[in-house]
Image (spheres, rainbow, N blue to C red):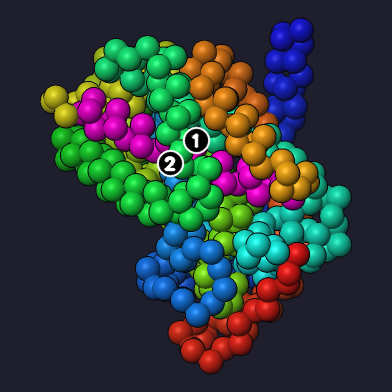
Amino acid sequence: MFDAINSFVTTVNGFLWNGLMIFLLMGTHLLMTVLTKGIQWKSITKGIRLSVTRDPDAEGEVSQFGALTTALAATIGTGNIIGVGTAIALGGPGAVLWCWLTGVFGIATKYAESLIAVKYRVKTKDGRMQGGAMYALDRGLNMKWLGMIFALFAGFASFGIGCATQVNAIATVCEENIGIPPWIVGVVIAILTAIVIFGGIQTIASVCEKLVPIMAIFYVLGCLIILGINYDYIIPAIATICRLAFTPGAAAGGLVGSGMLMAMRYGVARGLFSNESGMGSAPIAASAAQTRNPVRQALVSSTGTFWDTVVVCLMTGLTLVTTIMKNPAINADEISDGGVLTSLAFGQIPYLGPIILTLGIISFAYSTILGWAYYGERCVEYFAGKIALIPYRVLYVAVAAIAPIVALDFVWLVADTLNALMAIPNLIAVLLLSPVIVRETKKYINNLDAKDDTPVPIVDK
């Protein structure tokens, strides 16, 4: 039975990722870049400043920064560490460039999907803000049925991408570096997760506001130390990444590029897994933000893709490629486990390297568990009602407890497949509502700091 299920999921995954999703994602990224007139520049110059600016007079449950860090908590995870390593192992070093380009152009899609999520959000009777692709499809396009499909796929995806893969990664690194049995890790993570997620979005955002900046700075400093050790290979590594992104070939340290298609396939897939631009997950957190208009929060949300992929994933990619090129004994062509490649890279830092990597994976993965718990809750509530929240939380915690003993390869396969299936209806919403995105951008983009702009009315659910 399991073999049949595995074969079916593998077939579906191959169909989605061997062309369809690459075309949809990169096509949407490029189109949104053109329609928003290169919103990436505004995202960096204004979005970063707005992310630390409170908008207390606007309706919402958490600050703009709280919504951003909750989204970043879900996106900055094992995909930034193990995922990039896996992309290099399977798609060659050229996958790093495609992963990075997915992030650069994906900023525009993250902006677009967050804009419509905030514009079409609703307020529940008990004062909670809810939004996301399902509400954009429902209220913006009268396609409630497609909103239900998105919510269903996203709800299931939260157990895989958001929980099982992350707990499994924590259990593996704890067992290998500290000697803690996996089942103990599962129980501890389950308890810690339950304490936070039963407190709601305010508790999740409060934890993420403190955890995300610390963990990101800590990890990036580790990468910078390694790049300092490998400084003489940085330029050759960049040249190798760019060359093998388009043509097959070989380089030092067993680095092999299989050509443009394979590099794109794994680079784009890992890029999506990492930054989630186009998937429709981060806009769910954006919808809870205190913001007076959708453009402000859309710019703030789009900075998440910048930090996640343009900065953190690039740092990981350069760290791994320079390490492999400097150490010919590391045969990347024979290693398919991204975690192994990353461990070898951080092993260059005497004593502290394994500690930095261990703490990085634990904090990244745990924050992802919290962020995706919130995404899953909002989606489950959309298609099943508020009555389903407690059962969902209990099941989510249970999955966290048993994840260390689940076959990780199959979980990653399912996660990849569900990522694509939830991205499709979200991208449909972005493309069909692109005239609204353009109109709202023109309306608000030049008066982001104005105090007298009319707040967007919130519909009571």
Magenta region includes residue 208: no
Extreme residue toward the bottom, this view: 452
**Residue on which disc 2 sits:** 367
User: Residue 103, image x and y in percent?
Assistant: 49, 51
Residue range highlighted in magenta: 353-382
**Residue 41 lies in what quarter of the image?**
bottom left
Amino acid on which the number 2 mark rests in the picture:
Ser
Q: Are marks 2 and 1 in contact (CB under 8 Å)?
A: no
Question: How many residues crowd around disc 1 within 10 Å: few (fewer than 14), some, or many (20 or more)?
Answer: some
Lateral position of residue 373 relative to residue 343, left or right: right
Residue 395 position within the rendered picture, expressed as x and y whole percent measured from the top left: 62, 29
Q: Residue at x 52, y 26 (%)?
A: 400
Q: Is residue 86 shown left or right of residue 17? A: left
Question: What residue appears at the point 72 percent right and 8 percent down from the top-left corner?
Answer: 3
Give whichever of discs 2 and 1 has the lower sequence position: 1
Q: Residues within 10 Å of mark 2 (few under 14, many from 20)?
A: many
With respect to residue 345, does 205 lie above or below?
below
Residue that appears at 65% across and 62% down: 126
Instruction: Give the distance between the C-alpha atoms of the residues marked 2 and 1, in whole angstroms.
Output: 13 Å
Q: Which residue is mark 1?
A: 194
Image location (x, y in percent) of residue 237: 31, 37
197 or 308: nearer the eye?
A: 197
Q: In the rendered image, is residue 60 in sight?
A: yes
- Closer to us: 450 or 366: 366
